[in-house]
Image (cartoon, rainbow, N blue to C red):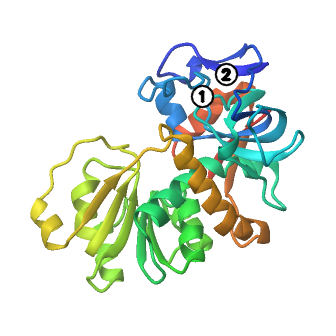
Amino acid sequence: MRAIQIHRTAETTALILTDEPLPSPAPHQVLIKTVSAGVNRPDIMQRKGLYPPPLGASPIPGLEVAGDIVEMGSEVTGFKIGDSVCALLTGGGYAEYCLASASCCLPIPKGLSYIQAAGLPETFFTVWSNLFDRAQLQNNECLLVHGGTSGIGTTSIQLAKAFGSRVIVTAGNDEKCQRSLALGADLAINYRQQDFVEAVLSFTDGKGVDVILDMIGGDYLPRNLKSLAIDGRLLQIAIQNGGKAEINLASVLMKRLTIAGSTLRSRNDDFKAKIARQLHEKVWPLLGSGRIKPVIDSVFPLAKAAQAHERMESNQHIGKIILEL
């Protein structure tokens, strides 16, 4: 089968199209013939040698796919050969065939294409787990998302609004701010022109936001704490500006703040299966009705995975970048 392997780290030229043997499913797995695969920041980190696959995972990059089940392990129930699914993976998505735990597969929502479905698992699992499971974002609370037009950002805006929250986002230019507002954000802050702390406090009449979803880290941490309301919750899911920051812990004590971090890839199947069930029950009907939908920035053929990574690293994309096989 055709697949993308990482032959050396860092540069996008490390992504090489190769011929690999067809994998065989374990008892709990399904084999999916991939139609499309999502591109995500962790793929870039893996290419750079900063995010190795978990023990036992495929070294082929790619954490989400959409396609058709062509083979099933002996313990798999609830699916049949030929079912069209999207799946969250621990690796292996940049390939014509990939293995997925059956518990991490979901049917493609009604009316969505394979390309749209490939943009669902990584972002929707991540956003649901952090905003609604860990942060317990509530109706009428206010959420701040850094990177409003990223895959995580566009998903967060739509999900938070669907469940009754107000949403503030930051973005790097006016076009991205306008696109965020069009998706439903209540306020979009161009962080290159305005201090997001001042803008957040002004919008909330000095109260601050209840929840922050942050992928930046570094010097954003103390600014995030200033932006949080009493009993506010900060969810740190990536550290694009680095993992070190200096903060005044007094503010954490006085405002009763919660700071939580998480990664999804290394969590076990039981954890991911719980999220899958919640998404199927509470979010898949919204996707099927068209009330929310994945935002697709661009589509590249598998052989041009390097160009897809370059597009993501340019930070010009709005929504998901997809590979098509």
Q: Which residue is mark 1?
A: 61
Q: Classify mark 1: helix, strand or loop.
A: loop
Q: Nearer the viewer, residue 290 or 264?
A: 264
Callout 1 amino acid: Pro
Q: Nearer the viewer, residue 137 or 311?
A: 137
Task: Report if residue 178 is visible in the image.
Answer: no
Task: Report if residue 109 is visible in the image.
Answer: yes
Residue at the image point whose x is 28% and y is 58% from the top: 259
Mark 2, other Cα within 10 Å: few <14 / some 14–19 / many ≥20: many
The number of numbered badges drawn on the structure is 2
Q: Position of residue 315 (x, y in %)?
A: 51, 46
Q: Position of residue 198 (x, y in %)?
A: 27, 73
Which quarter of the rendering shows the N terminus?
A: top right
Of all residues shown, which one is farthest toward the right?
82
**Position above or below: 151 against 223:** above
**Position above or below: 318 against 205:** above
Is 250 on the left or on the right of 98, as rendered?
A: left
Residue at the image point whose x is 37% and y is 69% from the top: 211
Callout 2 amino acid: Ile
Q: Nearer the viewer, residue 267 or 250?
A: 267
Q: Are marks 1 and 2 in contact (CB under 8 Å)?
A: yes
Is 7 on the left or on the right of 137, as rendered?
A: right
Mark 1, other Cα within 10 Å: few <14 / some 14–19 / many ≥20: many
Q: Which residue is mark 2?
A: 4
Q: Quadrant of residue 81?
A: top right
Q: Position of residue 49 (x, y in %)?
A: 44, 23
Q: Position of residue 321 (x, y in %)?
A: 65, 44
Q: Quadrant of residue 280?
A: bottom right
Q: Quadrant of residue 197?
A: bottom left
Which quarter of the rendering shows the C terminus?
A: top right
